[in-house]
Amino acid sequence: MTSLIRSERVAAGLLLLAAVVGLVVANTPAGPGLLAWADGHLALPAIGVDLSLRHWVSDGLLVIFFFIVAVELKHEFLAGGLNSVSRALVPAIAAVGGVVVPAGVYLAITAGSGLERGWPVPTATDIAFALGVLAVFGRGLPAAVRVFLLALAVLDDLIAIGIIAVFFTTDLDAGALGLAVVGVVLFAVVGRLGVGRTGAVRIAVVALLVLIALVTWWATLSSGIHATIAGVALGFALPRLSGLRAAHALEPVSNGIVLPLFAFSAALVA
């Protein structure tokens, strides 16, 4: 069962099925109640976190997916199809184009309407759905195309998040952001110290990494920056092989729980 859930096509099928179910259910008589439930808040006053259930998925659980994607992308940069500057530049340039062109089109359409400030909205790519569609319909495509699209989607999203953080975050908490940076550094250090460890020491290292990851997520969320950036940073921070092992362990959770929940909650539109 676990190996089945690891399959990209199965994961993509669950993602798309959950999205369809969410869209259909939201437009039935049960829809208003379900929407109210999804938008209901679950607070953790002790750490100052108060999110709707929908945002617990997109700002919390989805961090696991972004971590896995970052690990895969790091592997491609170091030992895969993007392991040279010339190869890595191609998706980087495409990502810049994927930000500039939609923003330009949006500004051209909304010029003089007073809605120009919304230009960052079309710059982001929904990585989960993009990779899901690719897994379902891209069976005959070369592996290099998937690597290119993976890098393109991640870089495009990072640029969009950066734009929002720099230009549109009015309540950026520098202290929390600094704590998040420290958390990423500690995560990298502990991850390297844990290489080759076995037994009780390995378990202790993993437990410490999980604790550091949770604190880093909380600090990133508290800073005002989209919390999924924590998953990306932590994924790049781990040593390549350790990261691949961690991603492999988390894949069933991401594919079988996180992505379907995200798709379902995102599709709850009446």
Image: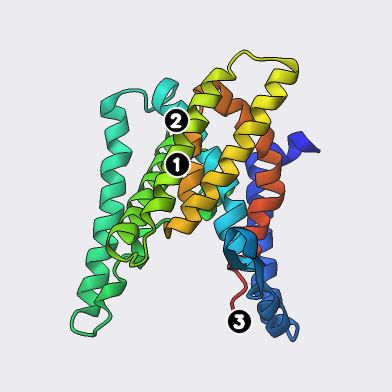
Q: Residue at x 33, y 67 (%)?
A: 170
Q: Secondary structure at mark 1?
A: helix
**Front residue of 59 and 119:** 59
Q: Residue type at mark 2?
A: Lys
Residue 19: image x %, image y %?
Answer: 63, 64
Residue at point 28%, 80% (across, down):
115
State the residue in front, 109 or 258.
258
Sequence-first tag of 2 and 3: 2
Residue identifier under label 2: 74
Q: Are marks 3 and 1 in contact (CB under 8 Å)?
A: no
78 w.r.t. 24: above or below? above
Mark with earlier residue (3, 1): 1
* Residue 267 x %, y %: 60, 69
Mark 3, residue position: 270
Alpha carbons under labels 2 and 3: distance apart: 39 Å
For marks 3 and 1, give the CA distance: 31 Å
Determine whether, in the image, residue 31 is placed left or right of residue 269.
Answer: right
- Provide the secondary structure element on which disc 3 rests: loop
- Observer able to see residue 146: no
Disc 1 marks a residue whose amino acid type is: Leu
Task: Give the labeled residue for mark 1.
Answer: 150
Q: CA distance from mark 2 to mark 1?
A: 11 Å
Residues 243 and 48: in front is: 48
Q: Which mark is residue 168?
A: none
Q: Residues within 10 Å of mark 1 (few under 14, many from 20)?
A: many
The image quarter containing residue 166 is bottom left
**Which is more N-terminal, label 1 or label 2?**
2
Q: Residue at x 68, y 75 (%)?
A: 24
Of badges 2 and 1, nearer the viewer stands: 2
Q: Amino acid at mark 3?
A: Ala
